[in-house]
Amino acid sequence: MADEIGPSGNSRRCYAFQASGGPVFQVFNQRTKWLQKERAASNAKQSRQADYLKDEIATRVCERLLDIQRHFPRVLDLGANSCNIARALTNESPDPSDPSAPPLSNKISELVAAESSESLLYRDADQAFNSQLAISRHVLTDEETIPFDAGSFDMVLSSMSMHWVNDLPGVLAQINSVLKSDCPFIGAMLGGDTLFELRTSLQLAEQERKGGLSPHVSPLADVKDVGGLLQRVGFKMLTVDVEDIIVDYPNMFALMEDLQAMGESNAILGREMGPISRDVLVAGDAIYRQLHGNEDGTIPATFRIIHMIGWSEGADQPKPLPRGSGQVNLKEILETK
């Protein structure tokens, strides 16, 4: 999210297709993002310590499965990071209202975890959760191209990766294509005003010290646009909601260090290269505390999570009646009250 502190056979295969349209506007440098993830995974201990946010969001994504009474033979985890969703699926007692409920992994026969960073994908391949579900790992050569057959998955999950996609409509169209009929996509990504405290503090500090601005926090999709994109690529029965997770840090430097350990540093094309100058950082920390600081001396960082659910079209799904087919005038009902 933010800039880093330091230098730091003959048969034809039918793949999921990319949505047609004009040229894609490139916002993020995918090579830079891959390098950031690889570097984060190289320090496994620090990377695991910084996984608290991704683990929490993955758990909230998996909790959506509690409302779907269905078994899923084959599931894709797109943008798996360090397999946070696989870990969440194996959590004991996932249903707060039923302590005896089995792990959600019982709903899934096979999980395919797909991620562009091989080091991050395999970071925890020796951990205990791997033996608690049938998981296979697939290294993506391109985060925005889904290399699986159309109609080959019973569900697609995605947590904390789609906010780095340049062609979000194209990726959503590919997700819809790899799904079988009447199957769900459940995802969560950062959006909206995520890290607005950090963004405003760095902007004010840089304007004060340098007399200008450069992008240090990545732009993100807004919740009001996500539903339209899902509908545009053919998803049905949409649900989109947003929640804020606020994490307190001792100072701005600790926040930026954790973002780097998460592999969530700034990856905007055309950003100012190299670390932020020390005087801007010191000024930014002071401004952060003055504008947003907590009474106990810590600083809050807001992560706005956009949750989305969409279903591939199915013959047995409920459909709206044709326009004009209603037999009751809503105006008359309201006027009688």
Image: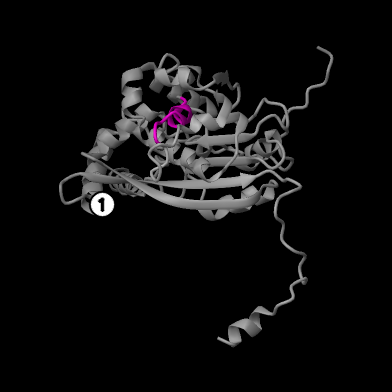
Residue plotted at (54% across, 56% down): 224
Give the image location of residue 90, x and y in percent: 44, 28
Is residue 79 among what the camera can see?
no
Q: Nearer the viewer, residue 111 or 174?
A: 111
Is residue 314 among what the camera can see?
yes
Residue 60 relative to residue 257: left or right: right
Give the image location of residue 127, x and y in percent: 40, 17
Residue plotted at (54% across, 21% down): 135
Answer whether residue 89 is magenta in the image: yes
Residue furthest top as drawn: 9
Residue ID for mark 1: 292
- Is residue 312 shown above or below 48? below
Mark 1 residue element: helix
Residue plotted at (50% across, 46% down): 307
Q: Which residues are magenta?
A: 83-93
Residue furthest right as drawn: 10
Answer whether residue 111 is magenta in the image: no
Corner quadrant of residue 205: top left
- Is residue 198 shown above or below 33? below
Give the image location of residue 176, x and y in percent: 68, 39
Residue furthest bottom as drawn: 336
Residue furthest left as drawn: 296
